[in-house]
Amino acid sequence: MSVDRRRLSLLLALVAGLVLFGTLGYRVLEGWTWLDCLYMSVMVLTTVGFGEVAPPSAAGKLFSIVLMTFGIGLMLYLLTLLAETVVRGLTDPLAVRRRKERKLIHLRGHTVVCGYGQVGEAVCVALRAARRDVVVIDHRPEHLEWAQGQGIHTLVGDATDEDVLRRAGAERAESLVTVINSDPSNLYVVLSARGLNPALRVIARASDESAAQKMRRAGADEVVNPYQLSGNRIAAMMLAPRLSRLLSGDVTSDHFIIREIGVPDALVGQTVEALGRETGALIVAIWRGGQPLRCRAGDELQAGDTVLVAGAAAEVDAVEAHRAAGGSADAGSASADSAGAGSAAGVQPT
């Protein structure tokens, strides 16, 4: 308990004792009812001045003088301390940080992003565009100011510390992305996160293939080398510029989007040809058992499949509507959210 809280508790106890003392005093000196004595005692201490219950005796008047002398100063000090405590609770950075962390307790299925540099910021922007809850961890408070302004949950601390990951809700999260500018730090985060939540999807950043292999052995589901990706992207822009723009999300046309959709029960057993004929969308690939399969017209969709769908926004939405009709309320809202994000980004996973 802080010093202010101990002092406040002591003052409240003194005030309660003073009210009790005044009530007993009026009862003994004046013989009024207990309610009248309590009323008179509180009125004297608060200086309200509504009026006396009855004309007091000389002893009662002297008792009131003593009660007012000690009580008024104590009440003023109590009110001052209360105001100071409230203002400090609203403005103290540590108190503000604690209130923010209490909000993280209620998060479920969110994404934890470790490291808020240029890469971390880009990840957060994309996730927020897809209506995902994000918690950012960084040990530099000044780097988190922009994230806070965007409504992103932030946590100041070292992401390699398991306690910090727990406070970020890693045990309840759906995924974790660690993009700290240090391979050893990212490796340690992967190990800690995998130990806290074996079902967590972990994506890590690595600067070379040696570090990437270690992170995969530590439990990372995916490892990304931003330097290699940048090189591949530049080469793709030279060799196939239109395809590169489309797949990277640079095309902001409502007439063609690509979206990843989980196959609901309503589509199980339906063929790729029938689904395309019904919706007009193009089924580009089927992911089954973690592996991509080339689509053929007669292929039947199975439970647990994920399809990569391309076409006009309305056509892709028609496939998404089957998912909503499959009985998932969450899928319906996800469809509406991802429709806007998909048309803006060009490529939108669901």
Image: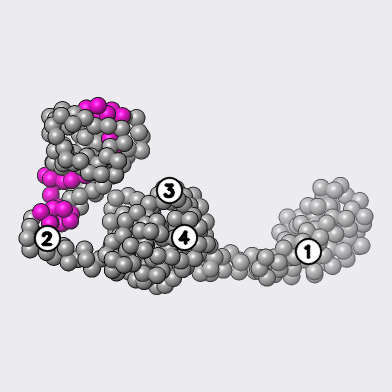
Evaluate if marks 2 and 3 touch, with contact meaning CB atoms under 8 Å apart.
no
The residue where tag 2 is placed is 236
Q: Position of residue 233 (x, y in %)?
A: 16, 62
Q: Nearer the viewer, mark 2 or mark 1?
A: 2
Residue 258 among those drawn in magenta: yes
Q: Is residue 319 left or right of residue 324?
A: left
Q: CA distance from mark 2 to mark 1?
A: 76 Å
Residue 190 found in image quarter: bottom left
Question: Element type at marker 4?
Answer: helix
Range covered by the magenta-colored residues: 243-270
Q: Is residue 329 left or right of residue 234?
A: right
Q: CA distance from mark 4 to mark 1?
A: 50 Å
Query: Residue sitting at 15 percent across and 57 percent down?
Result: 250
The amino acid marked with disc number 1 is Leu
The residue where tag 3 is placed is 199
193 and 18: which one is in front?
193
